[in-house]
Image (cartoon, grey):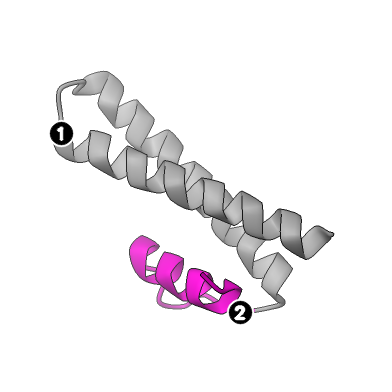
């Protein structure tokens, strides 16, 4: 997945309508932080409702997005 496509897909996933694009690296960093925040929120919700299948699935999806974002950042930094 290309960087611009990744940024667009994460914007849609997180519902960021007023996300200002800066540089590729900076945008990915900002989105990575937002993904980590969402990850923390879902983890807290799972502590309250540990059997919730939807939350578990969403946590898995976010984990994959975080891994992709970190790989993209590695490529952009090298």
> Where's residue 24, x and y in %?
68, 73
**Neighbour tally class for label 1: few under 14, some 14-19, many 20 plus, Cα within 10 Å:** few
> Where's residue 70, x and y in %?
63, 50
Q: Is residue 12 magenta?
A: yes
For the magenta stretch, what is the residue range? 1-21
- Say which quarter of the image contains residue 22: bottom right
Q: Nearer the viewer, residue 36 or 57?
A: 57
Q: Is residue 33 left or right of residue 11?
A: right
Question: Of helix, strand and loop, which one carries label 1?
Answer: helix
Pointer 1: what residue?
Answer: 53
Q: Earlier in the sequence, mark 2 or mark 1?
A: 2
**What residue is shown at x 38% (from left), y 37% (from top)?**
41
Pointer 2: what residue?
Answer: 21
Q: Nearer the viewer, residue 26 or 44?
A: 26
> Where's residue 20, x and y in %?
58, 79
Which residue is situated farthest in the right direction here?
Answer: 78
The circle drawn on residue 4 is none
Tag in front: 2 or 1? 1
Is residue 35 shown above or below 47?
below
Q: Which quadrant would the C terminus be assigned to in this image?
A: bottom right
**What residue is shown at x 56% (from left), y 74% (from top)?**
2
Is residue 14 shown above or below 8?
above
Q: Is residue 55 left or right of residue 53?
A: right
Is residue 56 shown above or below 30?
above
- Say which quarter of the image contains residue 72: bottom right
> Where's residue 7, x and y in %?
52, 71
**What residue is shown at x 46% (from left), y 78% (from top)?**
18
Question: Of helix, strand and loop, which one carries label 2?
Answer: loop
**What residue is shown at x 21% (from left), y 20% (from top)?**
50
Q: Is residue 33 left or right of residue 60?
A: right
């Amino acid at each position: 997945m290309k960087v611009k496509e990744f940024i667009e897909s994460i914007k849609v996933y997180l519902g960021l309508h007023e996300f200002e694009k800066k540089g590729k690296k900076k945008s990915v960093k900002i989105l990575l932080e937002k993904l980590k925040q969402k990850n923390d929120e879902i983890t807290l919700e799972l502590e309250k409702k540990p059997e919730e299948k939807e939350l578990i699935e969403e946590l898995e999806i976010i984990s994959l997005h975080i891994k992709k974002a970190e790989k993209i950042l590695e490529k952009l930094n090298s």
